[in-house]
Amino acid sequence: MKIFYESKSGKMNPEISLLILILLITSVAALQGVSSNYTSDSKLDFGATDNSSSTSYSNRFIEGFEPVGNYLSELYAGRFGALGDSSNVSTTDPVIVNILINSTDGTNRTQQDLHCSATLLDANGDSMNVSVNWYNNSVEVLSQEYNNNYPTASKFVADLYFGNTSKGQNWSCAIRAFDGDAYGSWVYSEGLTIENTPPTITLTAPSSGSLTTNRTPSFNWTGGDVDNDTLTYDFNISLVPASLCMDSNQFVEDISVNRYTSSVLNCFFDNGDYYIWSVRAKDGYSTGEWADYFAINLSALIDISVPVDSVTFGTIPYLGSNNTTNNSPPPFIIQNNGNSFINLNISATSLWEKASNPTDYYKLKIDNVSSEKGAFNWTGSNINWINVSTTNNTLFINKLNYLDSIDSAEVDVYVEVPVNETPTAKTSTVTFVSSFAE
C-alpha cells in the first residue's frame, strides 16, 4: 500500500506520510480480528482490544501482555504468555455429542440388540478412531475399539448382540474419540433396562379348517418364552353362526398345561356354523398376544345300530294276535351311535298275503327303553300304534339322543292274523332310516 500526502506548499512530507502509514496498518490489524480464519503474529506492544470472536480465530499474543478483548470464539485457540488467562478457551480435542442407547425395535426387550450411537466432532477436521465401553448395572463388561478413521460430523453406531443381555439388567455405554493427537473425554449414555419379552403361542391341533365329529374336541398348542419363564395359558373358542344355532364362548383362564378339552359344542358345520379357537400365554410379567385363530368345523356323524334286530312271534292261531309290549317276544331296539340328535323313519315289507301294508293287521309304535327314559322327544314321535307303511315317509322317532346314557328306544310290533290267511311262515323286513335332527 502506498500513502501520499501533499503539503500546502505542494511538496511531499515523508515524516508525516510514514506516521499515517503506521496508524493505518494498526487500524487494519484491529479490524481483521473478526475475520473467519484470522491468524496474527503481531508483536505490537498492546493487547487485543477489539472483538476476536471469529469462527476459527488463532492469535499468539506476545509475552507480558494480557488480552482484554472478547476472544471466546466457537473454535478459538490462543497461545498466551505468562500474563495470559486461557481458562475459558475451548479445546481442539475430539468431541462426542448426542449419545444415545436404544434397542433395534425400540421395545428394549430381551432378544433385541442394543445400539450405542453418537455424533463425532473434531475442530481441526481430523479423522477419528472410537472407543466404546459397555456397562451392565454400572459395571464395565465389554470394551471395543473401532479404528475406522471416521470423519468429523460422522454418525457412529456400536452394536451389542442380545446374547449378552438378560431381562432386568440395566445397560449403558460410553464413547470417546481419538484424532491422532489427543483423546476426547468419555461421554456416557443414560441407562436402559432390558424388559420382559411376552411369551408366544403356536397352535398345533386340530389344524385350521379341519373337520371333527367329536363334540368335545381336544386342543393342543406350544408355548414359547425366550426368558424361560413358567407359562400359564388362556383358551377361547367362539361360534361363528350361520344358522339359528346359539352357543356360548368357552373362555378358560390360567391353564397350566398346553392342552384343553372343550365342553360340548352345540352347532354344526352341516348348517353352515363353525368355530374359531385360540390361546394366549402369560409368564407372570406380561400377557402375550392371542395366536392367530384356527377354524374348526363340527360335522354331524349319523350312525345307528339295532342291538335287537329281529322279532320272532312263533306260532299264532288263526285270527289270533300278539305284540311286544310285554317283552314276550322282546321288541326291536334302535340305538344312536352318532354325535347328534337324529330322526328315524320306519318302513316294512308286507307281512300278510291277504293284507298288504299299510294295514291294521301289522302295526308299530315307539316306547322308552326302561333304563333310558327321555331318550327321544315324546311329542312328535309315534308312541301309539300306527299302521306300518312300505315307504319311508313316516316319522317314527323325533330327536333320538346321542348321549350314551340315553341313546336307545324300543320299536314295538303288533301283528294279527287276517281272515283267510294261509297257515304258512310269514316274514317282513323292517327298514330304519336316520337323519340329522339339529
Image (cartoon, rainbow, N blue to C red):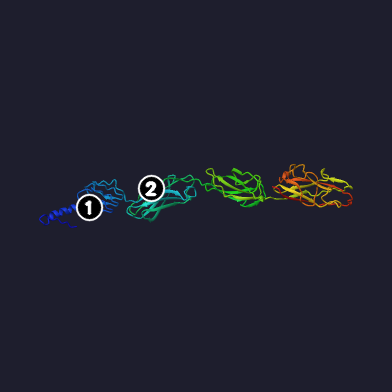
Front residue of this view, candidates 287 and 29 = 29
For label 2, the crowd category at 10 Å Cα-Cα, with few meaning under 14, some 14 to 19 and many 20 or more, is: some
Residue lying furthest left in this view?
A: 9
Left or right: where 205 falls relative to 162: right
Q: Amino acid at mark 1?
A: Ala
Whole-percent x, y for residue 106 in the image:
47, 48
Horizontal and vertical percent position of residue 91: 31, 49
Whether residue 123 sits left or right of residue 195 in the image: it is: left
The answer, for residue 42, to whether it is visible in the render is no
Locate the N terminus by quadrant: bottom left
Q: Is residue 336 left or right of residue 178?
A: right
Q: Examine the rendered structure and indicate whether residue 14 appears above or below residue 317.
A: below
Kindly identify which residue carries mark 1: 29
Image location of residue 10, percent across then percent down: 11, 57
Question: Which quadrant of the figure has residue 282?
Answer: top right
Position of residue 330 in the picture relative to residue 253 (left or right):
right
Q: Which of marks 1 and 2 precedes in the sequence?
A: 1
Up-down: is 385 above or below 25? above
The span from disc 2 to disc 1 (Cα, nearest Å) is: 40 Å
Residue 115 seen from this side: yes
Work out whether residue 188 or residue 351 is closer to the camera in this orientation and state it.
351
> Who's the residue at 89% across and 49% down the image?
419
Q: Which secondary structure lies at badge 1?
A: helix
Residue 435 image position (x, y, % from top left): 72, 50
Q: Amino acid at mark 2?
A: Val
For the residues labelled 2 and 1, say whether their Cβ atoms are less than 8 Å apart.
no
Residue under label 2, please give it: 187
Residue at (85, 45) in percent of width and height: 322
Closer to the observer: label 2 or label 1?
Answer: 1
Circle 2 — which element? strand
Q: How many marks?
A: 2
